[in-house]
Structures are given as structure tokens and as C-alpha cells.
Amino acid sequence: MTLDHLPVPGTTRLRILNSLPRQHQAHFFAEVRKLCAIYIASLRIPTADREAEILELFSEVMAKLLGVTGSGAGPKAAESAQEDGSPVMSGHHEPGRDDRVAWLLAEVRGWPALAHRREDIRRQRYGGKWQGEGYRQVQLDEDHVDNLSVDADEPHHDRDMRRVWRGILVMAKTEFAPTEDISILLELMAKDPEIAEAFGAEWPIRQIADALDKSHPNAPWSDDRVDNAKKRLRNWISRLKRAHGLDSTDLMGLFARYAGSYDKG
Amino acid sequence: MPAVMTKDDAVADRALKALMELDGESTPLSAAHDHDSSKPPLPSLDERVDMFLRAVHGSESSFTAGQKARARDRILNTMAADVAGDLSDFEISQAAGGADATAKTIGAKTIFAQGNGQKKRGFGSLFYGMLLLLMAPLSAGRPMGMRLVAASLITMFVAGTGWSGAWYLAARSAETAVASWIDGEAKAGRSYECGSRNLRGFPTHVELSCIDPKATVALGPSTVVVNAKALRATASILQPDVLTTEITGPLSISEPGKPGQYLGNWTLAKSVVHNVSSNPTQISFAVDDLQLYRASQINMEPVLASGRLRFDARVHPTGPGESRTFDIAAQIGEGSIANGGPILSQPFAANVSAELRNAGGTASESLTARLRQWQANGGLVDIKAARIQQGDAVATASGNLGLNKLGLVDGALLTAVTGTYRQLAQTYTGGRQPGQTDRERLANSLPEGSSVQSRSIGNIQKSERELRNEAGRQGQAPSVDQSNAPGGHANLPAGLSPPSLPKDGSFELPISIVNGAIYFGTTLVAVIPPLF
């Protein structure tokens, strides 16, 4: 690996995949499935078990391909800003001759990913470690899905809300310094029940300023200062939604899952 | 992890809702909202889910709500892990320093982490963190950095070469040591073979694997052949004198040229020996889910089983000139001995701690020779504490055991028994013949007692009369005719006495072993043949 040959961001692959016509996408999926079959065959797994192994590996590869983020945190923020978009490639009406499909397949082959994806599967299945900490995926069964709702009386709702807040706070810590107004504001919203109760159609700006004045008396909080922090918060939330293509509900789901990943790490 | 409020969480929902709705959008974002229209857009979550389902199930399928929910869940989990992994890499690159964004990107985007999204704190991240440290001055274009990079690379090359050389030497030494050991064992009447043998384990350890291992061992006048499926012996480069061995079953024990008479299997069989190159200072082994059967032409009869078997022997610190003593600890969980009579054929748990004194001999000697030497040295097993339990029946014991010049076991144990064992012990007392029916009845009262008959088929416990006659033929114990003297105790071996009166909650039962004959109180219960 040299300085001139930087790895391609995962978001670039996903953008290009998303730009393909359905027929081309289907061709790409079929080719990746073949790659997985070849890899599984090379492991000398019994024939009877191969189909299941291939499907599992293929779905893991696809999940990793589709689950990349253009996060607002970390180097991906800089990377997204520097990203020059997709490589210049020409399309073609035939999937097998489309440069974008060929490029994507080359990217999949270029990864040492198949072996790593299989290790991911093994780790998820047996709870082992992959060069460090790992995480478990929890699959929803049919009953869970049938009963799923956003009713506040749902038994796990409170726990889920707490996890969402934890995810927000942890992710914010990586983006903002603890002394920044936005961090202080989030901590207050997460931990002060009186402030939380005051939320309605409008933000309780005055109450927030008073509460922050009491807890941080050295630097007085005005309504304008709270409002500025709120604007920064709005920009951050908007950026996260845009970067991941998520609505409010899915973003909360991402925060909750991130809290789970962080806890296990 | 910051603590958040736990009470009145319905109120917290309002604050969360207000936060999530800050940008005013409530519908999934798609290409129209991408701030840079020059790039192809990232798909929304729904679009990702749709792609995933079409990839896995095919374009022609229609997808159920359950499939969509599972796919959604999976994608979100992967996205969360990707964020978590990205943040982890960012922390590493920040710690590595360097203001160059390119260098940061290199540090963050390793080929191990590419498209991965997992937190990588292990060997891969460490390696690339080091690479980042090396490359940072290079990217900054400082001349001094070139020398640093060159020196670092040379150091890494030298270290790598040295390590490889050390591993190669260790591997060759291991092969030589194994060959020498096999030669020495052959002189002691034990030979070992492998169907195939491999040496590997670079760079951290040396591993010798043996497929289809076979051991041929002389035991007195007879020879047994032991076959297993595989054997693997491993020693770390950093701890070369600690040898770990794993044996994969099934195992068969037979006489040469005959089919397996005993067959065994387990889920784990592992041993660890410290100071293996000279006199071992610690020997441990562990066996899980052991099953041993005696194979006949008709069927396979269980012999013994154990859910968990552990053994550990460590050299006890002794002064100069003192003979070696081992501290021994052993444990059996869910054990059963099918041939052990109606009691021991039931599951039991047992543990023992003891001292093996005056252990000596050399590895090249046969077992018989070592036992003779041990006896000649005044060897003794001092049982500090032994315990066996089956349900509410508990027996604890302490005492000592040794060998006499004839190779027969001599010793004494003081045992306290409670629960069903107490009632059982009382069947051996009272000056009457021991009640086989009593013992079977009591065995049935133990947990899982109803399986007595199926376990003891063909192995009806011998009566004391039969045992005495048998022992008498071997010259070990008085014959039954003499034991019928009035009082029942007139011809007891010296030193034996009737059991003491029961105390509160427990019953003391002295166990004596005289010339291999085991007495519970005054009742002969079993005979151990000579060990050499």
C-alpha cells in the first residue's frame, strides 16, 4: 500500500451501487454470490453444508456493503468532504460490460473481505473476538416483528429510549468537546427531568438558560447562547440524517444500536 | 458511560422527540436532499433494505414484513458498528499524532478496517498505528524522518528475521527432543507412532500435530495398544518449557492384533506439563464428558463416565537433599463407574487433595520400575482431604496409603459419612454378613437410584465370603471359615477394630487396607491386586 493508492471509501461503493439500474444490480449480486461460492468451496466445507455457508457469507458481505455510513464523526467527516465522488466510469446497457459493475466487483475481490466476513460470522455465532472487541447481532423473530409498535406502553420502550440517549451522548462526545455548549446542552436534556418535562411545542429556552446558569455559574447563559447551541445541534442531527439516509425513527435506532456496540466494546 | 435519568421516561421521550425533529424532516431522505448533487446519492435506509432483500432473495420475490424488519435491523446494526469502528480508528489515528489529513486517513482506513466498521484494537490496528507513526515524518517531508523510517524498518527487519530464526531453531529442537524421547520410551517398553506428523505454529509457538497416534505399552506380561484420532502438542516460543497436549478421541485400547477392547471418547482431553525438559514441576490434565466402554462381540458396556475430570500435581517446595513431594488435587464431576457396584454406578462428585511423597524415578523407567523405586524410598500418599457426594450422602476421609514390598496397597483412612452413606455404612457393621439387598435398596434411594439394575447387569457385587476366599487364595486375607468365629472379629488383621459408635449427624467408619484387602470397619469389601 502506498500513499498514492488510498483505499476507496465504502460510501463510494455504495453510491455507485445505488446508481446502477436494477438489472445491473442483480447481475452484481449474482457475481458476488459466485465469488462467495468459490471461496466456500476452497475451504473444503462438506457439500451438504455449502449452500447455507454461501448464503450466510453472501448476506454478510451485502450487509457490510450496504451498512457503511458517512458518519458525522471521525475521519469520515473529512473524507466525505475530500471525496472526489466516484471514479470516472462509463455505463453500458449490458450489465456485464458496465464499467461500474466491473469496478464494484474488482473492489469486492480487492478486499481481503471474504475471509474477514467469514470471521465476522464465526465471531457473531460463537461470541469470539476478532482482533479485539466484537458485538452480537440480535435477529428479530416473527413474534417480535408482529408485536412491534411505537406505543409508549411497550415493555421495552423505556429501556430503548435510554439506549438512544446513551448513543446520542457517546456519539456527541466524539464530535464535540465536553466544554462546548452543545455537549452541555445535551447532557442537560438527557439528565434533567424538569427540563425534559418542559418540552412541548417549543423548546423551553428560558428554562434551559436558567438551569445551565445554576450548573455552570462561571459563564452566564443567555437565551441567545442556548439558541445558538440548539442550532448547532440541529445542524448535527440534520447532517447525520442526510449522511445515513435516515429519518428520525431510524436515526434513533442507529443511536440505540451504537450504544449497544459501544457498551460491548 | 454517562448515566441518564431512569424515572419518568415518558417525559424524556418529549425531549428526544424535540431533538430528532430539529431539522423538521420526518420522511426518509434520498437523492433530493443530498447536499452535493455532483456525486451519486447515498441510498436511504429503506433503499438499502430493498437492495439487501433483492440481493439475498432475488428480485422476483415479494418480501414479508418480517423479512423487511429483519433486514432493517441488520443494516442498522451494521451501520452502528461501522460508526463505532470508524470512531475507534479515528481515536487511534489521533493518538498516533500527525497533522496531515492524508496520514490520518491512512491510519484510519486500514485494509483490515476497510468497509468493515468494526472496532479494531488488536494486532491489525497496532500494526497500522505503528505504520502511521513511521509514515508521518515521511509525509511531512522531513529529512530526519527518512533516517528514522529507515532505522525503524531495519529494526523491524532484523527483529523479524531474528524471531523467524528463533522459531526455526525451536522447531528443530522440538523435533530432535521428540525423537530422543521416543527412543528413550522405546527402551522402557513404550513405543509411539503417528500416521502423519506436522510441525507448525509460526510465529508464536511450536506445534507438533500427530494424526492417528498409536502407543504400544508393555504392562507387565501383557501389552496394550492405545489408538486415538489425533494428538497435538504445543509450546510457546516465550515459554518453551511448558508443553500443552490435546488428544482428540475416540480412543481404543486393545491387545496387539485384536479389535478394541475398550473404547473411549470425550469433548476435551488436555494436559499441561511445566519444566518438561527436565523433571516436571507441574502436571495437569483435564477431561470433559469422558465415556469409556468395554466392547464385546455383542455390545458396548459402559465402564465409567465423567462429566468433568481434573487433576493437578505440583512439586511441593522442599529443602535441599529432600526427596520430591507433589501436591495433588483431583476432582470428578458427574462421575459414575458402571462396574463399581450399585453405589458407584450412580452419578457422584468427588474431590481429593493429597501429598505424594518421595516421588522419584526417571521418565525412561517403566511404570512398574517406578512403583518399585517409590516403595523402596518409603513413598507415601498422604490424603489430606477426600470427599464424595451423591445427593444428601456425603463421605469425607483423610489418611494415608502406600505399597509394601509385595506391591500390595497398605493404608488407613478415617471416614465420616452422612445421609444415605451412613445407613450404608451401618450395613457393614453389626457383626452380621453385609446385606447386598440393603445396599441395593439404599442405592435406589440415591439420586437416579432406579438405574441400579441396568448398570450392574452381569456385575453383581461379590459377597464377603467370595472375597475372602479369593483373597485367601492369593494369601492376602483370612478365609471365610476362620472369620466365622464367634463375635465375628476374632481373625481380623492386626490393627483393625470395630467402627465407633455413631456421633451426631455422622458416622465414623475406619477404612483399612491391608495387603490390598479393603475393610470397611471389619468387613472385607474389595481386594486390590498387586501393582508390581
Image (cartoon, helix red, strand yellow):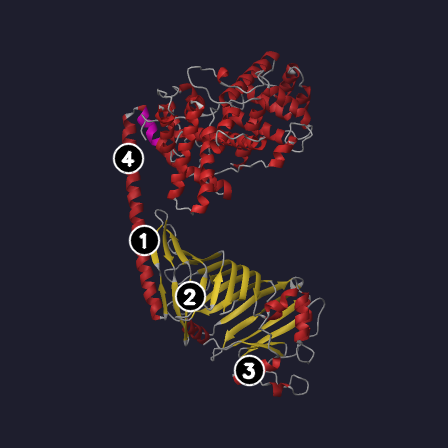
Magenta stretch contains residue B529: no
Amino acid type, label 2: Val
Amino acid type, label 3: Glu
Please, is residue B318 above or below residue A239 in the view?
below
**Residue B470, numbered label:** 3
Cα distance between the residues tagged 1 and 3: 54 Å
Residue B5 percent coordinates (x, y): 65, 29
Residue at mark 2: B226
SS at circle 3? helix
Establish whether labels 3 and 4 are both on one chain: yes
Visible residue check, residue B382? yes
Q: Name the chain letter of the residue that bears numbered label 2.
A: B
Q: Name the chain letter of the residue that bears numbered label 4.
A: B
Assign the C terminus of chain B to one quadrant of the image: bottom left
Cα distance between the residues tagged 3 and 2: 31 Å
Q: Earlier in the sequence, mark 1 or mark 4?
A: 4
Comparing labels 2 and 1, the label whose residue is closer to the camera: 2
Cα distance between the residues tagged 2 and 1: 27 Å
Residue A115 percent coordinates (x, y): 40, 39
Residue A264 percent coordinates (x, y): 53, 37
In which quarter of the view is residue B231 placed? bottom left
Range shown magenta: B133-139
**Residue B151, numbered label:** 4
Please tell me which residue is depicted at 46% across the width and 38% down the height of the picture. Answer: A55
Visible residue check, residue A258? no
Q: Earlier in the sequence, mark 4 or mark 2?
A: 4
SS at circle 4? helix
Q: Residue furthest top?
A: A224
Front residue (pair B388, A68)? A68
